[in-house]
Image: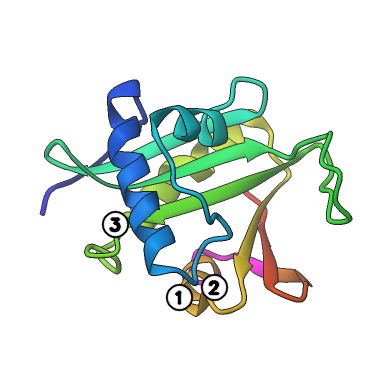
Amino acid sequence: MTLTVRRAQEKDMGSMADILNEIIEIGGTTAYRDKFDRQRVEKEFMPARLGISCFVALNGTKVLGFQALLWSDPDWPGDDRLPEDWAVIATYVDPTTQKGGIGRALFAETSQAAKEAGVRFIDATIRKENTGGQRYYQGLGFSDYRSGANSVSKKFAPA
């Protein structure tokens, strides 16, 4: 497999939705419950107001996964609001290609984008039952800082 990473483009959004929909259908690793289409991928992971970066990993022209980095939402109504200089990360890899270095390759680009944007900390909030996701972020150097009823939050300083 020849893996390349680049910024997500409009032509990738259908494949990104397909990957996320398969993960939703399997269940247990994402908080999302409703299916995605191209427009929802753009709205959720590439919003102009909060978007820092969104990278895709490819084998040839096939999208194998994607990773989005967004500024924390200053209008977040929940108790777990993050400081304005924090960012939130989301990683999705095709379930048939996990553990192939795709997440690490994506994070190499994302962490560089975070540094360039001046992000103080990156937040990864993971469902408690998603032990694979927790191990993934831990392996990248994220550390636990908060635990809720259904999730664990980890942080990473990109500087």
Q: Is residue 112 left or right of residue 118?
A: left
Which of 37 and 58 lies nearest the eye of the viewer?
37
Give amino acid for label 1.
Answer: Gly
10 Å crowding of disc 3: few (<14), some (14-19), many (20+): some
Which residue is found at the position 45% from the left and 27% from the top? 39
Residue that badge 3 annotates: 94
Q: Quadrant of residue 17?
A: top left
Q: Counting other residues with Cα less than 10 Å from the Cα at mark 1, is it few (<14), some (14-19), or many (20 or more)?
A: some
Q: Earlier in the sequence, mark 3 or mark 2?
A: 3
Does the magenta portion include 140? yes
SS label for mark 2 = helix
Residue in the picture at 44% in, 50% down? 107
Coloring scheme used: rainbow
Please say if 146 is above or below 94: below
Quarter holding the N terminus? bottom left
Q: Mark 1 — residue?
A: 132
C-beta proximity under 8 Å, tags 3 and 2: no
Report the magenta residues as a range: 138-143
The structure residue drawn at horizontal position 60% and vertical position 70%, both measured from the top left corner, is 127
Q: Nearer the viewer, mark 3 or mark 2?
A: 3
Residue 90 horizontal side relative to residue 120, left or right: left
Count of marks overlaid on the render: 3
Instruction: Determine the CA span between mark 3 and mark 1.
Output: 14 Å
